[in-house]
Image (spheres, rainbow, N blue to C red):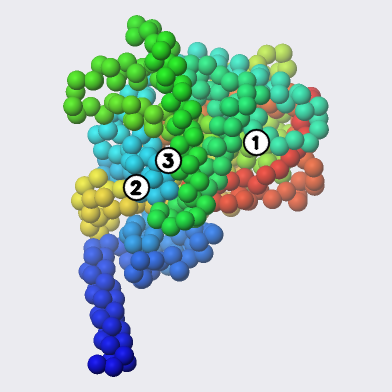
């Protein structure tokens, strides 16, 4: 047989394999919602702008509707878009949609363990344990409020050191937010000048950016910047390991000091249970999860919030007026003030809605075979909940593309809730630190504005408040500004 004949046979075999794969895929996808036709191995990735993945996914919903199938490489995912379908899935069918989906670059490290990336019974037990432990240490209570008020004063003291000169607020805000979760998890806070603490915050900030890139969301087996996520997590885990050992050496089972102590006690109690979910690896990964999530989300929201206020000085002026009228200058803000400050409450909610810090949430999976909106969704199917499409749903917000605090005010100027507000996600996977984050955002923002006026370095109209990048998180553009003492 000559070479041309052999080549023809190989070409025919390759074509047959390709047709077989396409046929198999189509058969597999018959029960799923329609979507763009995927290609073997690459899925739909050649049909979207990978640098603007969320924007592309939102645009596809205009063609295929609020629920469609999209392939991230070889993985079929069902994308949910818009308040109504997100409510039906995450809230009305909360249990069925509560599995944790695949997040390749992170799960290289987590391997499905920990409170954020775990699933099934292990995740349920970890969540119950964390909620109970945090409540015992004051989360949502006055004792934690006092701790946040104290940290707010440390933050203001650091701001005063800038002496009205331009500065980047990133690490000040990261330190403040991180110290609150450190109090719960590690039992104490860090100084803003602590070199190890600043290194850890830099690792968290770096990972947040990488996880928000397309590389971080879809890549697994090929080289790329996402590989740094794994290395950074190992460094975070090493630090947590040091803290775990410190606690272990000084542990008093009758007087736990923090979350780590409680976990160590639980591990000891369960040591003879072969089916336990409480072990050293789970403790390490859960602690890193809490440290990471408690640091980045609040600090990113505040960082984005200050940039938005620089763009809208008229909003800052109204905030100053309400703070001066309700709180004054002679005492620190407290959570009791919130009910008497509807405009401030509305602004904070609108910052969270507009900043949209976690626009697509963390991927979910189906926990059992179900019928949903006329389609059969099999167990373990990946779900991408586009939380941003609820936060920007034009049927729920009158002017979703604009920053407008009146989205959360009624005609009488009183604060009003909106069910489409999903800044903390929704359903079984709603952020367990929601109450803590609300306290932090209110107390940090009001304490800062009680003491300072924001001064931009350019004309407010020229300030770009669109995100620098959008993926797992919406990353605010880097900026500097001045804080002028009032």
- Closer to the chain start, of discs 1 and 3, is 1
Residue 87, position as x, y percentages in the image: 37, 46
Q: What residue is at 55 percent from the left and 27 percent from the top? A: 178
Q: Which residue is drawn at 70% across and 27% down?
A: 449
The circle on residue 101 is 2
Q: Which of marks 1 and 2 is nearer the N terminus?
A: 2
Q: Judge whether residue 267 can be spotted in this image.
A: yes
**Residue found 56% across the figure and 42% down from its top:** 206
Q: Mark 1 points at which residue?
A: 170
Which of label 3 and label 2 is nearer to you? Answer: 2
Could you say where residue 473 lies in the image, as x and y percent from the top left?
52, 45
Q: Give x and y (percent) for residue 236.
A: 48, 33
The residue under the point 67% across, 44% down is: 478
Quickly name the residue at label 3.
Answer: 425
Say which mark, if any, is on residue 235. none
Dot 3 and dot 2 residues touching (CB under 8 Å): no
Residue 367 shown left or right of residue 303 in the figure:
left
Of 28 and 265, which appears nearest the observer?
A: 265
Instruction: From this view, report whether residue 25 is shown above or below residue 67.
Output: below
User: In the picture shown, does residue 91 fall above or below 1?
Assistant: above
Q: In this view, does 332 lie above or below 375?
A: above
**Residue 356 showing in the rendered view:** no
């Amino acid at each position: 047989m000559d070479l041309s004949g052999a080549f023809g046979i190989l070409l025919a075999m390759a074509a047959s394999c390709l047709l077989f794969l396409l046929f198999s895929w189509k058969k597999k996808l018959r029960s799923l919602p329609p979507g763009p036709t995927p290609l073997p191995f690459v899925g739909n990735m050649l049909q979207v702008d990978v640098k603007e993945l969320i924007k592309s996914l939102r645009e596809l919903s205009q063609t295929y509707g609020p629920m469609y199938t999209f392939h991230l490489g070889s993985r079929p995912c069902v994308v949910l878009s818009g308040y109504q379908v997100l409510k039906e899935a995450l809230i009305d069918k909360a249990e069925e949609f509560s599995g944790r989906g695949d997040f390749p670059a992170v799960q290289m490290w987590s391997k499905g363990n920990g409170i954020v990336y775990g699933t099934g019974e292990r995740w349920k037990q970890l969540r119950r344990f964390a909620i109970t432990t945090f409540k015992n240490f004051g989360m949502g209570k006055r004792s934690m409020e006092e701790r946040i008020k104290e940290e707010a004063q440390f933050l203001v003291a650091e701001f005063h050191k800038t002496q009205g000169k331009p500065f980047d607020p990133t690490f000040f805000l990261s330190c403040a937010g991180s110290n609150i979760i450190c109090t719960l998890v590690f039992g104490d806070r860090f100084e803003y000048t602590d070199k190890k603490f600043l290194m850890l915050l830099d690792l968290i900030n770096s990972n947040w950016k990488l996880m928000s890139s397309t590389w971080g969301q879809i890549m697994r087996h090929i080289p790329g910047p996402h590989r740094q996520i794994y290395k950074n997590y190992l460094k975070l885990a090493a630090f947590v390991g040091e803290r775990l050992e410190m606690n272990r050496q000084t542990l008093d089972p009758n007087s736990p000091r923090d979350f780590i102590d409680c976990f160590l006690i639980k591990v000891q109690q369960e040591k003879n249970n072969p089916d336990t979910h409480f072990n050293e690896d789970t403790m390490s990964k859960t602690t890193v999860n809490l440290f990471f999530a408690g640091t980045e989300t609040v600090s990113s929201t505040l960082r984005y919030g200050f940039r938005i206020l620089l763009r809208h000085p008229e909003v800052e002026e109204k905030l100053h007026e309400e703070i001066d009228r309700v709180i004054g200058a002679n005492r620190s803000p407290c959570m009791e003030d919130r009910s008497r400050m509807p405009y401030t409450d509305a602004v904070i909610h609108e910052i969270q809605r507009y900043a949209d810090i976690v626009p697509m949430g963390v991927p979910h999976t189906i926990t059992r075979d179900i019928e949903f909106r006329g389609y059969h969704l099999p167990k373990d199917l990946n779900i991408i909940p586009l939380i941003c499409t609820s936060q920007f749903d034009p049927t729920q917000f009158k002017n979703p593309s604009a920053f407008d605090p009146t989205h959360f005010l009624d005609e009488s100027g009183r604060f009003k809730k909106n069910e489409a507000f999903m800044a903390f996600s929704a359903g079984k996977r709603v952020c367990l630190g929601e109450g803590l984050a609300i306290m932090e955002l209110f107390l940090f923002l009001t304490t800062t504005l009680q003491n300072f006026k924001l001064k931009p370095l350019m004309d407010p109209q020229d300030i770009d408040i669109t995100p620098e990048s959008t993926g797992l998180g919406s990353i605010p553009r880097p900026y500097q500004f001045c804080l002028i003492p009032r």
